[in-house]
Image (cartoon, rainbow, N blue to C red):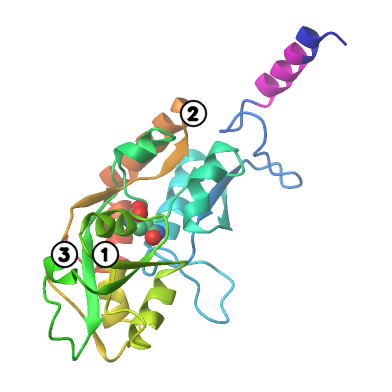
Amino acid sequence: MKKWMKAFALAAICVLSAVTLAGCGGQGADSGKKVLKVGSSIDFAPFEFQDEGQKEYQGFDMDLIRALGKEMGYEVEVNNLPFDGLIPALQNKTVDVAISGMTINDERKENVLFSDPYYQAGLTMVVRDDEQAIQKFTDLKGHKVAVQIGTTSAEEVKKIEGVEIHELNTPADCFTELKARGVDAVVNDRPVNDYYIQKSGATGVKALPERLTAEDYGIAMPKDNAELQKKVNEALKKLKDSGEYDKIYAKWFGEQK
Ligand code: GLN
């Protein structure tokens, strides 16, 4: 077959299956239901996590993406990927969307599209209870600080002069390192730090009140799928208008916004 014919045939197949969101692929084989392949790094409670002995992934992002999928007529299939592997997975189309407490920023926008913002966060610090020297971000100079690799925390801490930065795989690894005195502070997203301290029964550590940044979370999608971006934004708006978003929000964060 000539090259152009091959390309044409491939395009035709894509068009025929274009009922799926991400062009080729995404059709649930046996159920006949459309599947939305979601990438998420399941290490970020209360946004995405897995309780011991539980099969189901849970959290605010998980509830939100399932509600969005339902609204758009898709069955949601979540794939657990490392946080720094999410953008590559979107680029090579292993997944259709990524939801993972991911901050919308210009650098990422060069590689992916984002939905409208769905949650406001920002960075705070966790230190040991007996810590005297570190109260503000500027106090980090001369200290060892753990951050999750590939995150805005890593980026921001690199801007502070004289910090010895330890880039670890997950926030849990960062907290373990803090308790083991391998580092003096953890920089991470505020709601995740707060949840760790308040809900997971962490002892011997405290979150400090200062906020280094204000960041918006967005759902990331392949750069070439503006159609999907539009659908996700429409579905997000519907969930906000119907009160469904507020219900999910209240479940994880209480009524206060
Ligand atoms: N919001 C931070 C970021 O986008 C951290 C996200 C995460 O670790 N899941 O980099």
The disc, 3 or 1, on the residue closer to the chain's N-terminal end is: 1
Q: Which residue is mark 2?
A: 225
Dominant secondary structure of the magenta stretch? helix
Crowdedness near tag 3: few (<14), some (14–19) or many (≥20) residues, C-alpha within 10 Å: few
Indicate left or right for 93 with 230 as reference.
right
Q: The residue tagged with tag 1: helix, strand or loop?
A: helix
Dot 2 beta carbon under 8 Å from ligand 1: no
Could you tell me residue 164's position as x and y percent?
30, 68
Mark 2 / mark 1, whichever is N-terminal = 2
Callout 2 amino acid: Asn
Q: CA distance from mark 3 to mark 2?
A: 34 Å
- Residue at mark 2 to residue at mark 1: CA–CA distance: 31 Å
Q: Single out the mark in the foreground, 2 or 1.
A: 2
Which residue is found at the position 73% from the left and 21% from the top?
13
Q: Which mark is residue 250?
A: 1
Report how far apart the C-alphas of labels 3 and 1 lie in the structure: 8 Å
Q: Is residue 207 visible?
A: yes
Residue 28, picture quadrant = top right
Numbered mark located on residue 256 in the image: 3
**Which quadrant would the C terminus be assigned to in this image?**
bottom left
Secondary structure found at label 3: loop
Q: Which residues are magenta?
A: 7-17
Check whether the beta carbons of the residues at disc 2 and disc 1 lie within 8 A of each other.
no
Q: Amino acid at mark 3?
A: Gln
Percent coordinates x, y for residue 239 in the rendering: 33, 46
Label 1 Cα neighbours within 10 Å, binned few <14 / some 14-19 / many ≥20: some
Quadrant position of residue 172 = bottom left
Residue 186 against residue 68 in the figure, above or below = below
Q: Amino acid at mark 1?
A: Ala
Quarter of the image where the N terminus is located: top right
**Number of the label disc, if any, that sits on residue 52:** none
- Look at the picture and state if 141 lies above or below 70: below
